[in-house]
Image: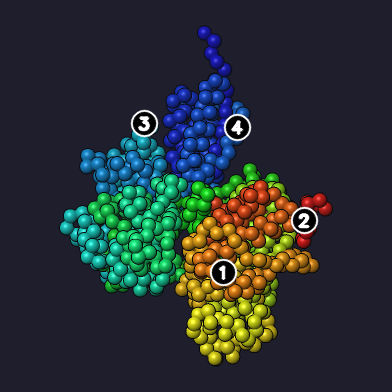
């Protein structure tokens, strides 16, 4: 009998392969095909070496590709980026083994934390199972990953579970190739794993009669507030129907108006409060289990049914999630009611993840604290998504999503030109950082706004993790912000460069979608440093690969009082009317609001500022504020983007109205200017109902973008920046462009707001270097067509 020749094959699996059960799954597959060889994690990739006949190797390779393709669908195409085959000569090996991990430790592409899987959930409630009601149950397909990892590769000794030695029963499961917890790094049980602890408001141990969840249920029903430490950190909970408890949380967090998120027991209960579509349900039930913004189901009074009116004041949407952690599943089994679920921190501060800081922040204020002894290395806020055109759009990257990894080599040819690693420090607000490493961009979790010292400390912890091995060799990229990040000096880096804020927005979308054709990048947000005298945020760029040039911009408004103007839509409305009516602008606003909008003293201070320009802005977000005030929606923002959100909600009452206001587009020396002052004048003379006027304004914005795309003679447009979180605006733009057969892109995996800036900074840094070396005449784009 002729023996088939044994051929060697090496496979390198690249991407987020840390913590997904990659090695045990490959061993099972190799055993199924009776292959010899080994699998090993080297920190950057998973290496597989097999020896077999060509036919068996072909079947194994096809099965491997299929297996990871299925997993990548579950986790949004971020699990397996590429598979490379290489021939390799190797001495004969016996059987198939999992080798010890090798490589330099580094906190890079670790798999995000994964929601409790269906099999573990069944075991959690199975009285015959040895992990019955154990709140740290997990397997190779679910549980904590990124939040407890101290570095890569993802092995137990490099996680916060290192201190918990597996018992004999767990060890037997871990070493059994036929067990579903074979090689599960987070394996634990009641005998050997982390344990719960109940505390009162002052940190004293509570000895609850019976199960902890029954005690927590009674506390909530009695109107109490509880804190629970889940995967990313502490969250505060209260019944969503109890307005007094919710008001107490608002007072504790110093968050008087901003909407709260909800934890729902399941889809059936969610549908009693909301109107989720199929794509939203799928996202809620996925392994990332994020908060999803869903339209609420209204009652006869116009409020969201069954909720206390202070859960989401003046908001027709709610951000909802389903249980993702065993503790939440256990609580919801006995409660079966909607809960307000919000991060345990004062407004603007970093999420709290340890007992000491929780008690310092809320001493004597909480009715019950459910904590445990598993430390959290990286606190993670909940990720937030909305669905646009049946596609998920990430608004905040946290638990279940971070870190976001994008393969540079597959998307951008110029990535191969860049050998040095880059570190991007992101934006001042909604901060995240990013690094480039081995032709990948790795975008960190959301930190928050860097004005707060606790958020700055959290960012610096991530920087230490991400630059563990090579800080001094990094080239650091920063935002065009006057405040130099102090961490640059602490890292002792060699070189730094600046990428303008709105270019970074445009580049983030270009990176995610690998846009290589000439396209118009529209970047609209509320604020970004542009020049000394003007804050940008209403930008149109022409982009072709590395080349980027200004094409158009919105008209500039006076920024009356600097930062203060961004909190007061009345000031932006005054700035919009002043070129039209001068001193009479104050009377115009008083007539709209039927009261005096500015005191005599305020008028005296503001008139000189209006007559002699000191600081202007062309940010689209400020035009939203101006129009919101002109429509008597808001004179002060209660929180970021409040007036703009109310303007969107008002316009949604008139969806179907296709009318728009007239705009003037003026040619400049280097770029077009879109004059919206005429729009303000038309709004004042329009006697239509307020929802119709709000809808006409949205239609005008979408029509403006479509007209500029025509002028640019492009077949693709990208939309980015915080203004495009407005789902109505984004959908109107998409429809307008598609009617003209123009492709429309927007960030979906990378946050569309400032949370995605760092990823765009990385690509900009790479393209700037590649562009300076390769720019040719036929690649240059005219600045004004």
Front position in the image: 447 or 603: 603
Disc 1: which residue: 624
The circle on residue 85 is: 4
Q: Which quadrant of the view contains residue 250?
A: bottom left
Q: Residue furthest top?
A: 1
SS for dot 2: loop
Local crowd size for mark 2, using a 10 Å CA cut-off: few (<14), some (14–19), many (≥20): some
Pinpoint residue 523: horizontal percent, then vertical percent: 63, 61
Local crowd size for mark 1, using a 10 Å CA cut-off: few (<14), some (14–19), many (≥20): many
Q: Earlier in the sequence, mark 2 or mark 4?
A: 4
Q: Earlier in the sequence, mark 3 or mark 2?
A: 3
Front position in the image: 478 or 449: 449
**Label 4–label 1 contact, CB within 8 A:** no
**Label 1–label 2 contact, CB within 8 A:** no
Q: Earlier in the sequence, mark 1 or mark 2?
A: 1
At a point 77% along the width and 61% down the height, the residue shown is 784
Observer able to see residue 271: yes
The answer for how far apart the CA atoms under marks 4 and 1 are is 53 Å
At a point 55% along the width and 81% down the height, the residue shown is 589
């Amino acid at each position: 009998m002729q023996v088939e020749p044994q051929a060697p094959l090496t496979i390198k699996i690249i991407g987020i392969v840390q913590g997904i059960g990659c090695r045990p799954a490959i061993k099972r597959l190799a055993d199924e095909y009776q292959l010899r060889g080994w699998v090993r994690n080297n920190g950057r990739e998973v290496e597989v070496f097999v020896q077999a006949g060509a036919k068996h190797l072909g079947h194994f390779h096809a099965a491997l590709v299929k297996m990871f393709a299925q997993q990548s669908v579950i986790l949004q195409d971020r699990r397996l980026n590429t598979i490379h085959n290489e021939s390799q000569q190797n001495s004969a090996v016996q059987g198939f083994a999992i080798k010890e991990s090798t490589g330099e430790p580094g906190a890079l592409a670790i798999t995000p934390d994964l929601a409790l899987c269906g099999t573990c959930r069944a075991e959690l409630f199975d009285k015959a199972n040895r992990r019955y009601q154990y709140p740290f149950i997990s397997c190779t397909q679910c549980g904590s990953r990124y939040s407890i990892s101290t570095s890569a590769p993802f092995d137990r000794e490099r996680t916060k579970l290192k201190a918990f030695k597996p018992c004999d029963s767990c060890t037997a499961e871990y070493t059994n190739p036929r067990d579903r917890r074979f090689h599960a790094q987070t394996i634990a049980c009641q005998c050997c794993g982390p344990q719960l602890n109940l505390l009162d408001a002052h940190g004293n141990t509570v000895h609850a009669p019976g199960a902890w969840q029954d005690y927590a249920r009674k506390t909530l029903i009695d109107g109490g507030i509880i804190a629970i430490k889940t995967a990313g950190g502490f969250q505060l909970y209260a019944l969503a129907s109890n307005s007094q408890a919710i008001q107490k949380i608002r007072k504790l967090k110093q968050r008087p108006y901003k909407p709260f998120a909800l934890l729902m027991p399941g889809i059936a209960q969610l549908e009693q409060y909301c109107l989720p579509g199929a794509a939203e349900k799928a996202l809620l039930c996925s392994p990332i289990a994020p908060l999803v913004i869903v339209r609420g189901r209204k009652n006869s009074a116009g409020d969201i049914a069954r909720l206390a009116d202070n859960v989401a004041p003046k908001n027709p949407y709610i951000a909802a999630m389903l249980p993702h952690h065993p503790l939440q599943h256990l609580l919801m089994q006995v409660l079966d009611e909607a809960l307000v679920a919000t991060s345990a921190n004062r407004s603007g501060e970093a999420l709290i993840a340890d007992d000491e800081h929780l008690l310092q922040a809320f001493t004597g204020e909480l009715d019950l604290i459910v904590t445990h002894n598993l430390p959290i290395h990286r606190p993670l806020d909940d990720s937030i998504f909305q669905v646009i055109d049946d596609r998920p759009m990430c608004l905040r990257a946290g638990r279940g999503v971070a870190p976001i990894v994008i393969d540079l080599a597959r998307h951008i040819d110029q990535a191969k030109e860049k050998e040095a690693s880059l570190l991007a420090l992101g934006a001042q607000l909604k901060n995240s950082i990013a690094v480039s490493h081995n032709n990948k961009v790795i975008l960190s979790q959301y930190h928050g706004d860097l004005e707060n010292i606790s958020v700055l400390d959290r960012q610096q912890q991530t920087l230490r993790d991400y630059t563990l091995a090579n800080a001094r060799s990094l080239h650091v990229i920063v935002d065009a912000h006057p405040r130099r990040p102090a961490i640059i000096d602490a890292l002792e880096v060699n070189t730094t460069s600046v990428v303008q804020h709105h270019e970074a927005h445009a580049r983030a979308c270009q990176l995610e979608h690998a846009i290589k054709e000439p396209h118009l990048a529209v970047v609209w947000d509320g604020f970004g440093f542009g020049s000394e005298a003007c804050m940008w945020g209403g930008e149109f760029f022409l982009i072709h690969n590395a080349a980027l040039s200004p094409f158009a911009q919105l008209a500039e408004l006076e920024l009356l009082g600097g930062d203060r103007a961004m909190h007061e839509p009345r000031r932006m409305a005054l700035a919009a009317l002043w070129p039209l009516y001068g001193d009479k602008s104050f009377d115009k606003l008083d007539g709209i609001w039927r009261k005096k909008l500015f005191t005599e003293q305020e008028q005296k201070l503001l008139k000189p500022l209006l007559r002699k320009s000191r600081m202007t802005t062309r940010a689209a977000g400020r035009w939203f504020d101006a129009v919101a005030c002109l429509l008597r929606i808001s004179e002060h923002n209660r929180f970021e983007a409040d007036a703009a959100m109310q303007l969107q909600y008002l316009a949604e009452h008139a969806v179907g109205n296709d009318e728009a206001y007239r705009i003037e587009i003026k040619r400049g020396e280097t770029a077009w200017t879109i004059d919206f002052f005429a729009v303000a004048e038309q709004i004042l003379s329009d006697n239509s109902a307020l929802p119709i006027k709000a809808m006409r304004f949205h239609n005008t914005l979408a029509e403006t973008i479509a007209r500029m795309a025509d002028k640019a003679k492009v077949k693709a447009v990208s939309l980015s920046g915080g203004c495009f979180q407005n789902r109505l605006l984004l959908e109107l733009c998409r429809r307008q462009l598609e009617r003209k057969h123009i492709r429309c892109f927007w960030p979906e995996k990378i946050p569309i707001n400032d949370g995605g800036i760092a990823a765009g900074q990385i690509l900009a840094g790479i393209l700037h270097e590649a562009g300076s070396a390769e720019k040719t005449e036929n690649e240059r784009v005219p600045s004004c067509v």
